Amino acid sequence: MPHHLTVIGGGFAGLTAAITAAESGAQVTLYESHHTLGGRARTTEAGPYRTNEGPHALYNGGPHWAWLKQRGLLPPLAPLPPLEAARTRLRHRGMPRRLPPLGMLKLLRRKPEQAPVDRDFLSWATDQVGDEGARAAAHYIAVALFHHDPGALSAAFVHERLRRAFKLPPEAHYLRGGWSALIDVMAARAWDLGVRIETAARVDSGALAAHAQDGPVIVATSLDAARGLLGDASLRWDSGRTVLIDLAIRRRRGDAFIVSDLDTPGWVERFSAVDPTLAPAGEQLIQGQVPVGPGESKDDGVLRAEELLDLGMPGWRERTTWRREALANGRTGALDRPGTTWRDRPAIDRGDGVYLAGDQVAAPGVLAEVSFTSAVTAATLAVGASRRITA
Ligand SMILES: Cc1cc2nc3c(=O)[nH]c(=O)nc-3n(C[C@H](O)[C@H](O)[C@H](O)COP(=O)(O)OP(=O)(O)OC[C@H]3O[C@@H](n4cnc5c(N)ncnc54)[C@H](O)[C@@H]3O)c2cc1C
């Protein structure tokens, strides 16, 4: 008899869990509270522009890449034209530069096992290469951390991300049309496997308990939502707070592709350089993120993003045709403090047939890879548990 399994949440984690469980022969029902699937991987259409919630890259060194590719689920990629790659600018000591300080590059040569878990990145990296390279590296890697002070996080955690973000050829890839292209193919695969998908279907604690009577339940929501659903106050982990800026401007030759701030965390990127389908002809779509500290406001972050735009896209104000700003608080994945690793985050197996998946739980990887890995693990454990019960 096929065993039944419930998945709560239809984002990247929920769909990964549903597909994994259905491939093992489970009968899966997935509930998503929003009227569309995707969660934070949704691409929204704002008039003629297509934007993700902040810059979204898929790293090809991650486990999700191989898994998606094996199943033919990788949507068409938007390759970066070589000329655009050369238009990357770094702000260092207030000036635009093409190359980072040597100390930052030297850090990349340190082996992963050399970066300690129990020390903060800035003090460790300063011992290795001096203050200038250490600070520049900490600020550069904010692009994958969304944190206002990456130097205060675990050296092992930050160094792993630095190595992956700075690899050549680059690991970061962009999906043509945005991440919803990925969600669409994953949803189609889930349908093909017989997964029952219910959208606009919010599950509350009572309904969760009822589903748990029928078989294992995978809670694939954000950690905040899981905390409420499971009534478990211990479900907490650090995450970033960042200002997001989306901007459409009229095209002009010579605009930078990326402006990365090495003086303080911040990043703006002209996404339509990689994927022209994101903006109408003659316009370009820029997205940026500037992490802000607890005492800083959205306006502080916007101001810093504007400084980067001044540096890389001169005259952008007069060319602006559309603009949107937002603050993403605690939505950008797990951050590990000194002395902690992913193993210390909330465990996947919550007992009584309930499993957690998401980007702030105990699984390795960068950003959405944590959602992916925890979802595969949760589904494997859940299917194994229900097989044991049925047997
Ligand atoms: C600004 C920003 C930039 C990012 N950039 C990158 C990047 O470049 N690369 C990368 O790999 N990752 C990136 N991420 C992270 C990535 O978006 C997330 O890790 C991933 O999308 C999380 O997927 P998830 O399924 O775990 O959670 P979510 O996407 O949050 O999905 C959870 C789903 O559960 C649903 N839900 C919640 N409560 C209930 C309920 N009670 N009943 C039913 N459904 C419910 C929600 O509606 C949602 O659809 C970024 C995130 C942000 C915010």
Image (cartoon, rainbow, N blue to C red):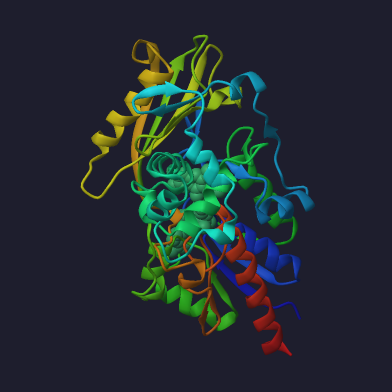
Q: In terms of depth relative to the viewer, which is nearer, 357 or 300?
A: 300
Residue at the left extreme of this rendering: 295
Residue 52 at what x, y percent from top left?
A: 50, 38
What residue is drawn where x is 39% and y is 12%? 319
In this rendering, is residue 203 above or below 277?
below
Q: Is residue 286 above or below residue 145?
A: above
Q: How far across and down, in percent of the image, does residue 272 sit? A: 55, 24
305 on left or right of 178: left
Question: Which image quadrant: the C terminus?
Answer: bottom right
Q: Nearer the viewer, residue 121 or 333?
A: 121
What is the total number of numbered labels drawn onto the structure image?
Answer: 0
Q: Measured from the top left, where is residue 97 in percent x and y?
A: 46, 23
Residue 87 found in image quarter: top right
**16 with respect to 323 (left or right):** right
Image check: 170 left or right of 90?
right
Q: Is residue 389 visible?
A: yes
Q: Quadrant of the N terminus?
A: bottom right
Question: Which of the 4 image quadrants contains residue 290?
Answer: top left
Up-down relation of residue 85 to residue 292 (above or below): above
Q: Is residue 38 visible?
A: no
Q: Which of the 4 image quadrants contains residue 179?
A: top right
Q: Nearer the viewer, residue 85 or 382?
A: 85
| Viewer-side residue, 58 vs 47 | 58
Q: Which residue occupies 61% across, 44% down?
A: 58
In the image, residue 156 sits, relative to residue 144, either above or below, namely below
Residue under the image location 66 percent in, 82 percent down: 386
Rendering coords of residue 169 (x, y %): 68, 36
